[in-house]
Amino acid sequence: MKDRYLFPAIFEPGDTAGYTVMFPDLPGCITEGDTLEEAFAMAKEALELHVYGMEEDHEPIPEPSRLKPATVPPQAMVAVVEAWMPVIRSKMANQSVKKNLTVPKWLADAADRADINYSQVLQEALKSRLGVAGGLADNSH
């Protein structure tokens, strides 16, 4: 698993406005933006999330190809987009996820009266039970 990926992207202007962005080496990795600046930002995010999903699914990540001019539509341009994976891995590993839980009514009533933050208590209890300290999850594979 690499920390940095560079893939060529095709930025194709729309008929009236905006850009569609495609990564030929990564089928299904497509995004768009109303302006070129927005299209570049969206391309970076799309690439990062696509590669992250491939890593999580243990799919092989292809080597980037060199695009041949004949494969680029007229009026489109090619740019290399970077995905710096340590940042996205950390962000994804530490995002909050919703979990439903069930507690007896008497306990829920007591917790509500005490103004208990369920999320905080559950996180503290899970960390204690698992023997892990605060911070970032180890997301190595």
Image (cartoon, rainbow, N blue to C red):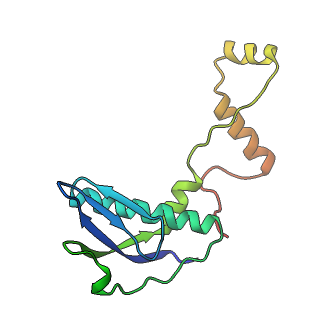
Q: Is residue 31 above or below residue 111?
A: below
Please give the name of the residue rendered at 55% of the width and 77% of the height, measured from the top-left corner. 61
In the figure, is residue 85 to the left or right of 17? right
**Does residue 119 appear to the left or right of 27 in the view shown?**
right
The quarter of the displayed image where residue 1 is located: bottom right
* Apparent side of residue 109 relative to residue 53 in the rendered image (left or right): right
Q: Is residue 109 left or right of residue 67?
A: right
**Image label count:** 0
Residue 132, x across and y down, in percent? 72, 53
Which residue is drawn at the image coordinates 29% and 85% (left, top)?
70
- Across and down, in percent, residue 14 comes to 23, 59
Q: Nearer the viewer, residue 64 or 138?
A: 64
Q: Nearer the viewer, residue 34 or 5?
A: 34
Q: Nearer the viewer, residue 140 or 83?
A: 83
Image quadrant assignment for residue 17 = bottom left
The quadrant of the rendering that contains the C terminus is bottom right
**Residue 21's x, y, as percent?**
33, 65
Residue in the image at 68% along x and 12% along y? 113
Residue 23, percent across and down?
40, 71
Residue 70's place in the image compared with 132, above or below, is below
Query: Which one is nearer the viewer's eye here, 98 or 25?
Result: 25
